[in-house]
Amino acid sequence: MMSKLFLFVVFINCGHCANILGLYFHAGKSHHILGEMLLKELATRGHNVTMASPFPLKEPFPNYTDIHLTGILEDQLARESMFMKMNKGHALVGVNDVLELTRAQTELTLNHTEMGKLLKSGTKFDVIIIDWFMNGAILLYGTLFNAPIIPIASHGTTHLANSIVGNPSPPSYIPNTMLPFPSNMTFFQRMVNGLVTIAYNVMGHSNAQYHQALLEKYFKNVPSLDELKNNVALVLSNGHYSFESARPFVPNIIPVGGFHVQKAQKLPQDLQEYMDEAKHGVVYFSLGSNMKSVLLPKEKQQEILKAFAKIPHKVLWKWEDDKLENKPDNVMIRKWFPQNDILGHPNLKLFITHGGLLSTIEALHHGVPVLGIPIFGDQKANIPNAVSSGYAIQLELADLDETTLGKALDEILNNGKYHENAKKRSQLLHDRPMSPMDTAVFWVEHVIRHKGAPHLRNLGNYLPWYQYLMLDVALFLVTIVTIVGFVFTKICCFICRKKKEKKE
């Protein structure tokens, strides 16, 4: 009887299981972290998960199968210098480098032998979860596997997330993610924001044409990218009003910012003792997974060390080498640190960061003040947002030296308002009816249950731009008014002329 009962329970549970494909070919580790965390949670809840990416798991995980996409990570490592290049100039600097990178990674995936094997295997999937980052051609896999697609927008609720589901994003009060503007923009800022938005739309159209040509290069009789958008069920946005300005959402864009952050665990013994015994607390410094500290100019490295040597705090610096010249005694370097667990330690006083969105969210989750040194991309908007929320100070890389860093450290470490504001914002991030991970899982399973959830789609996403903006209606009304006005004028002229003829 017990055996039969066990088999019955297994049968019932398997009835709710789904086959899920994760497609995370972008070589940015921060992007992959989001996909891996969600897919692991889905696997834990009984779903069968397959993940295609350049980052296979180091240890086996139940219900989780890796497909290793080789060659992609190696390609990105060869382009590391682009990150420092993107630090200089305006919002459009470096965009071509990023486009070239994502196009190369997309082509490597479309033409990858492992993806070809997966297609030929005949494996069926109930849903496909992808990283959405200027890689429109990847939507074809929804058609090839006959499965709905859920993109995860690791960059938050930006123009990339909005465009795929037709979410409104008025440039009058929603700043472009590449611009350090507040929501209450000045006239000049609104003008710049509008022009940059137009520029990105033009580049987006050009990029779509490239991806269309890429599809036609490797596949026959492919649909257009506009048609492939029909495969998109909804978007999970790595955004939230605690760190993004308030904005509208259509039903199929779901903010789940912070779902990757877990409860802080006890650190390895040496790190635990290092932080526990820090009399004045600890400062943690990391420039993330893409931008590396060793890429900083050597003079910047030495200026940073001089400033660290003058504070009584211990410092943990994520340094991607075994040696660091002139390192003071209060600085510990390692190629990798368990960042989330460090940020959750009660003795951590400050996080010095590049301002990547995942790092910003993790700091906010644990209520840690931030000293931001934005390098490129959305970092240049994330840090100003944190500054305006009162829990951060910003330093530009070009201005970074012993004096500027020393003043910033003194201000943020000795002024309690930054810590208080970080705690207040942290409360906003945590104050939700469901945890962000439970929310993400619910909507993935909702899409599976309802076969792509077509009821959530915004029909405005399928209108041509001139219809969406009602320009055709405006033109029609102007034409009608013009014709009526012309006819009325002609009639009046005719009547006046007749009256004049009668008088004569």
Image: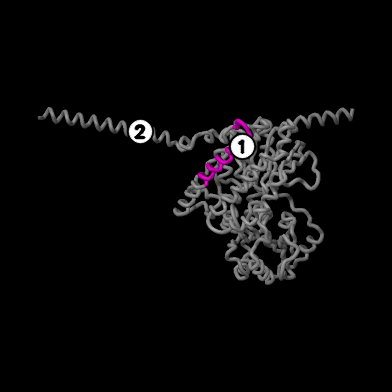
Amino acid residing under circle 2: Thr
Magenta segment range? Answer: 200-222
What x and y, as percent, mark residue 210?
57, 41
State the residue in front, 264 or 434: 264
Q: Based on the displayed image, in which of its 4 quarters is residue 142 positioned?
A: top right
Classify residue 475 as left or right of residue 68: left
- Residue placed at 13% from the left, 29% from the top? 501
Q: Which SS class for mark 1?
A: helix
Closer to the camera in the image, 458 or 5: 458
Secondary structure under tag 2 reads helix
- Between the residue at mark 1 and the residue at mark 2, the CA separation in whole angstroms equals 44 Å
Q: Which of label 1 and label 2 is nearer to you?
A: 1
Q: Vertically, is 404 above or below 68? A: below
In the rendered image, residue 220 lying in the magenta stretch gets the answer: yes
Residue hosting label 1: 217
Outermost residue on the front side: it is: 217
* Residue behind mark 2: 479
Looking at the image, is mark 1 or mark 2 earlier in the sequence? Answer: 1
Q: As rendered, which of 85 and 226 lies closer to the eye?
A: 85
Q: Residue furthest left?
A: 504
- Main SS of the magenta part reads helix
| Residue 37 showing in the rendered view | no
